[in-house]
Image: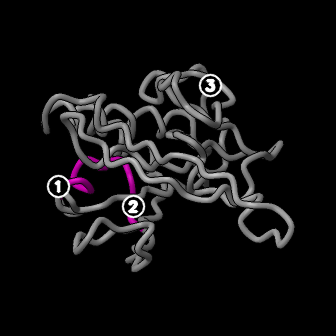
């Protein structure tokens, strides 16, 4: 089972419906509704439930979300229909300042540790528009970084600020208990 912990309008997904994915978000005003409205830092899921978690959090704060319209993936490749445009949503309105965003990232990664299977993978997407990748990753002390991928796509990056996908796996329980105690 896969969790998209920050579904927004499922923008990163080509296929926006799947029985293998649960999409959650706290935002009520979305074009493509999540499976469940939930706070990913206090989720309703059982421990060790997910095989994979996708985490594409807000990369900034203070409102001012740039809103772009992108073709819906289901109609994008069709020769016979005009693509339906869906808005992006970045969640910058959820945090007043950097401290709030950093606190959220820290709480969310702790919750992901609880709900991800021991051999599961956390995929974290980060754009360096306001906070460096190094600073963001320093919050993920419960995780081993397995892979880091730099993305050059104009739909995945903000100007000259690079975007990264980072794959992580859980650290062993004895190490984590020493951190949490």
Determine whether label 1 and label 2 are within 8 Å by CB: no
Determine whether label 3 and label 2 are within 8 Å by CB: no
In the figure, 179 relative to 46: above or below?
Answer: below
- Check disc 3 and report the residue beneath it: 45
Determine whether label 3 and label 1 are within 8 Å by CB: no
Is 118 one of the magenta-colored residues?
Answer: no
Reading the chain from its start, which is encountered first: label 3 or label 1? 3
Reading the chain from its start, which is encountered first: label 3 or label 2? 3
In the figure, 33 relative to 3: above or below?
Answer: above
Reading the chain from its start, which is encountered first: label 1 or label 2? 1
Place of residue 17 in the rendered image (x, y in percent of width and height, measured from the top left): 78, 45
Q: Quick one: which residue is furthest to the right in this view?
A: 80
**56 left or right of 142?**
right
Secondary structure category for the residue under label 1: loop
Of badges 3 and 2, nearer the viewer stands 3
Q: Which mark is residue 67?
A: none
- Check disc 2 and report the residue beneath it: 144
Extent of the magenta region: 135-145
- Check disc 1 and report the residue beneath it: 131
Q: How far apart are the two marked residues, 3 and 2, measured between alpha carbons? A: 23 Å
- Tell me where residue 127 sits by quadrant: bottom left
Place of residue 87 in the rendered image (x, y in percent of width and height, measured from the top left): 51, 46
Of badges 1 and 2, nearer the viewer stands 1
């Amino acid at each position: 089972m896969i969790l998209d912990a920050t579904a927004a309008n499922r923008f990163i997904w080509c296929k926006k419906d799947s029985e293998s994915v649960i999409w959650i978000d706290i935002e009520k005003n979305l074009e493509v509704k999540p499976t469940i409205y939930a706070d990913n830092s206090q989720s309703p899921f059982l421990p060790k439930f997910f095989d994979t978690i996708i985490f594409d959090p807000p990369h900034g704060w203070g409102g001012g979300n740039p809103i772009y319209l992108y073709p819906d993936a289901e109609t994008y490749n069709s020769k016979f229909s005009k693509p339906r445009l869906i808005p992006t949503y970045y969640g910058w309105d959820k945090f007043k300042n950097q401290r709030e965003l950093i606190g959220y990232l820290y709480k969310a990664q702790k919750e992901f540790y609880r709900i991800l299977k021991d051999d599961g993978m956390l995929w974290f997407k980060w754009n360096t528009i306001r906070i460096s990748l190094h600073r963001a990753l320093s919050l993920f002390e419960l995780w081993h970084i397995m892979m880091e991928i730099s993305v050059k796509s104009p739909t995945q990056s903000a100007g000259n600020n690079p975007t990264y996908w980072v794959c992580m796996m859980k650290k062993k329980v004895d190490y984590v208990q020493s951190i949490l105690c």
